[in-house]
Image (cartoon, helix red, strand yellow):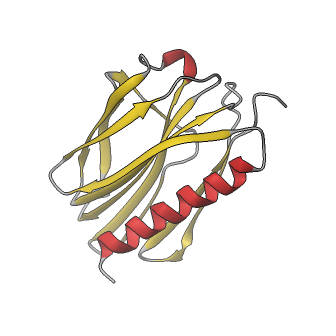
Amino acid sequence: MDFKMMVTRLMTLLFLSLMTVLSQAEITVRDSAQGSDASGALQLQHNLQSGSNRIILVGVSLESVGAIGQVSDIRYGDVEMSLVPNSLIAKQTGSYSIMTAWYQLLDAALPADGEQTLNLKYQASDITAVLVQIDGVDQSENYQVNTDSSSSTSSLTSDILTTSANN
């Protein structure tokens, strides 16, 4: 299996894991988008839906030959996103490296409802990204992030657990 397919599957599994955990609370997964790129800039189109206690989460995975890749700018509708604390993990083996991270934008900072563009600039050989809108999320940013970089030289796992705004 080539790397791009493996990363796409990994990001999809992480996204599905997130949806499974969130569906057990009073949290609603509203809309999502995903894509991959090798040009240094990725754009994803997304329809921001109205709701309350919303969050936009973006999971990224970068592959590089040489130095560990990095995201230099990530904006959702011209609003800069922030890194979810403790969510960035990276691994380098020889000349090969992989990095994964989660980025967030809480309800108070979201742009107007409707069609929005995620603009992501990065330094790496390749990127895969998954974007999801979730409603009903506690806005205090007390997220639990579990990461594992010890499983192999070509995979990283990262889960994020949010809580309902109604807890």
Name, please, the residue furthest toward the bottom.
Answer: 1
The mark tally for this picture is 0
- Left or right: residue 94 compared with residue 90: left
Expressed as whole percent of the image width and height from the top left, the position of residue 95 reads 26, 72
The image shows residue 22, relative to residue 151, as above or below, that is above
Name, please, the residue furthest toward the left.
Answer: 39
The image shows residue 97, relative to residue 137, as above or below, that is below
- Left or right: residue 136 compared with residue 13: right
Q: Quadrant where the N terminus lies?
A: bottom left
Q: Quadrant where the C terminus lies?
A: top right
Q: Tell which of 92 and 22 is nearer to you.
A: 22
Expressed as whole percent of the image width and height from the top left, the position of residue 14 reads 55, 60
Q: Tell which of 58 and 153 is nearer to you.
A: 58
Residue found 31% across the figure and 21% down from its top: 78
Residue found 33% across the figure and 24% down from its top: 77
Expressed as whole percent of the image width and height from the top left, the position of residue 104 reads 50, 34
Q: Tell which of 61 and 131 is nearer to you.
A: 131
The image shows residue 78, relative to residue 130, as above or below, that is above
The image shows residue 80, relative to residue 26, as above or below, that is above
Residue found 44% across the figure and 20% down from its top: 113
Expressed as whole percent of the image width and height from the top left, the position of residue 48 reads 44, 29
Name, please, the residue furthest toward the right.
Answer: 167
**Res 146 visible:** no
**Res 83 visible:** yes
